[in-house]
């Protein structure tokens, strides 16, 4: 059992993450855990409209949680980890404004079964939804990247802290304190990119937009286009979203 955890604070762009989960190709049993708070919630009905497609993609359960007060991202991760199924072996950190590649759940499950405690991909392509520009993020060996995942039994031991930024780094550092001999698995997609991170529609990474005009490592120019990363029908939905935004 794999748990996909989705904390949402990214406006209506969350449809992008949901589409990617509906398009997963896996034989692995998995669940989706969604958490929102009183600020900018989309509401349970929004996620439930994807339920039949999620089921077709192998999702056995959709859990929705709502906090009546504004809580930090770190607190959301701690709370969601405790809500995961008792048989869950791994938690996938799903960003609301990212499109996960279709084999993410299947590949992540294999890595957890092989003993991984923390997994991440060191490369991801970004698309700025307002500038309509592409950018590549690539950072080898730092432990932080895209498609991150945590062994569930370790995630359940996170301390409850209020932390609003640099949360990915906090998660990894906390894991190293919980388990000093942490098994970190870094993987790399050698082919054309599959999956996409977006910028310009979220409310957390507010300074990254500068990189699209003047890339500074670990951000680089890229020859890949939007159609290399996501299906044509998702590009259409993204174009429609841009018109409304």
Image: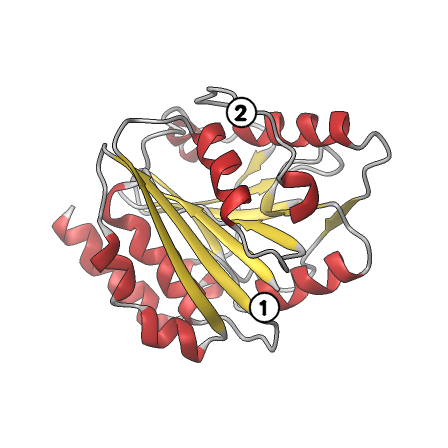
Identify the image quadrant of the C terminus: top left
Residue 159 found in image quarter: top right
On the image, the x and y values in percent for residue 219 come to: 55, 35
Residue with the most extreme left position? 244
Asked whether disc 1 touches disc 2, contact meaning CB atoms under 8 Å apart, the reply is: no
Occupied quadrant, residue 51: bottom left
Quarter in which the N terminus is drawn:
bottom right
Q: Is residue 22 above or below residue 14?
A: below
Decide if residue 21 is on the left or right side of residue 10: right
Q: Is residue 106 above or below residue 199?
A: below
Q: Position of residue 29 (x, y in %)?
A: 58, 71
Locate residue 187 relative to residue 195 in the image: left or right: right
Which marked residue is nearer to the observer: mark 1 or mark 2? 2
Residue furthest out toward the right:
181
Residue 196 image offset from top left, x and y in percent: 47, 54
Q: First in sequence, mark 1 or 2: give its number.
A: 1
Nearer-the-camera pick, 192 or 1: 1
Q: Is residue 172 left or right of residue 18?
A: right
Point 73% across, 38% down: residue? 140
Say which element carries label 1. Answer: loop
Q: Quadrant of residue 183?
A: top right
In the rendered image, is residue 151 in sight?
no
Residue nearest the observer in this picture, 61 or 174: 61
- On residue 160, the disc is 2
- Element type where label 2 sits in the image: loop
In the rendered image, residue 126, in percent from the top left (x then y), is placed at 46, 45
Q: Is residue 85 left or right of residue 56?
A: right
Q: Which disc is residue 103 wearing?
A: 1
Q: Residues within 10 Å of mark 1 (few under 14, many from 20)?
A: some
Residue, x 47% and y 71% (percent of image)? 60
Image point 51% across, 20% down: which residue? 161
């Amino acid at each position: 059992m794999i748990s996909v955890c989705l904390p949402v604070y990214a406006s209506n762009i969350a449809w992008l993450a949901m589409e990617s989960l509906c398009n997963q190709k896996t034989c692995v049993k998995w669940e989706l855990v969604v958490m929102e708070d009183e600020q900018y919630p989309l509401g349970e009905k929004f996620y439930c409209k994807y339920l039949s497609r999620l089921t077709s993609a192998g999702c056995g359960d959709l859990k929705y949680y709502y906090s009546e007060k504004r809580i930090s991202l770190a607190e959301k991760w701690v709370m969601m980890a405790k809500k995961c199924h008792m048989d869950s072996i791994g938690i996938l950190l799903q960003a609301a404004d990212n499109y996960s590649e279709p084999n993410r759940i299947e590949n992540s499950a294999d890595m957890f079964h092989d003993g991984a405690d923390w997994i991440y991909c060191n490369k991801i392509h970004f698309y700025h939804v307002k500038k309509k520009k592409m950018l590549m993020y690539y950072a080898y060996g730092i432990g932080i990247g895209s498609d991150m995942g945590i062994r569930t039994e370790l995630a359940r031991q996170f301390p409850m802290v209020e932390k609003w930024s640099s949360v990915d780094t906090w998660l990894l550092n906390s894991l190293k304190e919980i388990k000093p001999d942490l098994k970190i698995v870094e993987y790399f997609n050698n082919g054309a990119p599959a999956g996409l991170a977006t910028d310009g529609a979220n409310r957390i990474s507010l300074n990254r937009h500068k990189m699209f005009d003047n890339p500074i490592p670990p951000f680089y120019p890229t020859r890949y286009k939007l159609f290399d990363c996501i299906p044509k029908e998702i590009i259409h939905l993204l174009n429609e979203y841009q018109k409304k935004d």
